Amino acid sequence: MIDLENMKVLIVDDSEGMRKSIRGMMMVLKYGSAFYFAEDGKEGWRILKEKSVDLIILDWNMPNMNGVELVGLIRDDRRLRDLPIIMVTAEANQEIVAEAAESDIDAYILKPLTTQSLGDKIKHVIDKVNNPAPMVSHLKKARDLEEAGDIDAAIIEAKKAVFANNKSSRPVRELGYYFYKKGHLNEAKKWFMHATDMNKLDVFAFHYLGQIYLQRNQIDKAAQCYYQAMNISPRHISRAIDFGKILVKKGMADQAVKVFNKALELTDDTLGLHESLSNFCFEHEMYPYAINLMKFILRQIPTRHDLLLKIGRAYEHMGQHKMALPYFLEVDKADAKNIKVKLHIAETLLVLKQKLRAEGVIKAVLEIDPYHSDARTLLRKCL
């Protein structure tokens, strides 16, 4: 049981003023006997590993690690996963609601906070923890049984949770998940679809519907589910990217590009995602798309000579040597002693039947390394 007056509270917010304000309101309410403070999710996670905490109040939008990311870590930790969490946000939109539902946040409260609104929310959450509803008790028991390897018993408990609260999509989707774990895809699909009918923002259910359709090679339906999950919650971008990569490996590059483009529209880390996707697409010989991604990065960071070289190599792989040459030459201007780049230039010039120019480049290589075997081989082709 958590005692309101004596509980230990962790407040995570990148604003020192907000941290102090929340503590001040709680002191007026006489809620809490000890307070810990963190300015972002990383610091909050460190404190949780070191301190005993009864309640977490955290901001949604923070640098380094946001509130949703911290919640994910907490819920994946056996020791911490049942801690009550209240999320504070200034943004009342469907994304927050979806994130809260998926991440098992106990409640969220909108800024600006008042002493009364904060007090009412805390009391409501702690009451639920101290007196768990039958649905919650059944779901926790189902989770423990699933982790112990008894999926059949977990399914029975999840059905009891559905019966205990037939208005919530959470036990319905959990039941679908246990059937999915057991490999009963038809039954899983039925419950996941029921969950999405009950809650159009149940991103968890949409994700697993996508997984089922993917296993059945129903790519268009799988894509629709992943698009829906991304639209509801950008947190699902990484899962959608994984889906796109699977499509590439299945030889469905065009469909994969649509998924990647949708993810790029929604991500906050535009450059980072462009970088990782360009590397993946280059490795899987999706050269035109990889080139477009790298050119986007170059427009933001023109000094990325490694990308200039990679674009040149991509054109080279495509047999478009005239397109490749300017990129190799640009890199050579920045790094005149880079033998690797000069060899690319020489090889390209030879393909373009410009032997005299190629010979000059090769001789420049031999001035740097007189015994370079590849350069000597190319020089013989110039004769």
Image: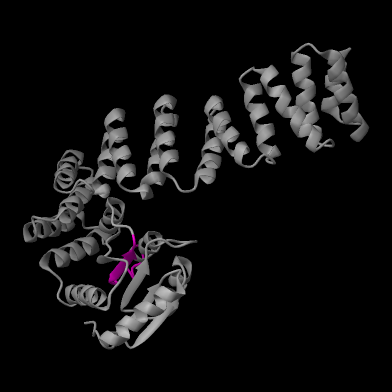
Q: Quadrant of residue 62?
A: bottom left
Q: Please state which of residues 94 and 286 is positioned toward the viewer in this rendering.
A: 94
How far across and down, in percent of the image, does residue 320 sit?
65, 17
Counting from the top left corner in percent of width and height, residue 167 is at 9, 55
In the figure, is residue 101 to the left or right of 169? right
Quick check: 208 above or below 23? above
Residue lying at 36% horizontally and 81% vertically, measured from the top left: 23
Residue at 25% from the left image edge and 40% from the top image edge: 209
Instruction: Give the camera-side residue of 382 and 119.
Output: 119
- The correct choice, above or below, for 248 with respect to 16 in the image is above
In this picture, is 367 found above or below 354?
Answer: below
The correct choice, above or below, for 349 with respect to 336 in the image is above
Q: Which quadrant holds residue 207?
A: top left
Q: Quadrant of the C terminus?
A: top right
Question: Which residue lies at the image location 90% right of the left edge and 35% below the top edge?
Answer: 368
Q: How is the image coloured?
A: one colour
Q: Nearer the viewer, residue 83 or 273?
A: 273
Q: Which segment is the magenta one?
A: 76-90
Residue 358 image offset from top left, x and y in percent? 84, 19
x, y (%) of residue 70? 40, 64
Q: Is residue 39 left or right of residue 222?
A: right
Q: Is residue 72 magenta?
A: no
Q: Quadrant of the N terminus?
A: bottom left
Q: Specify whether residue 242 is in view.
A: no
- In the image: residue 65, left or right of residue 219: right
Q: How many marks?
A: 0
- Residue 325 visible, this orientation: yes
Q: Taken as a whole, is the magenta stretch helix, strand or loop?
A: loop
Q: Residue at x 27, y 34 (%)?
A: 213
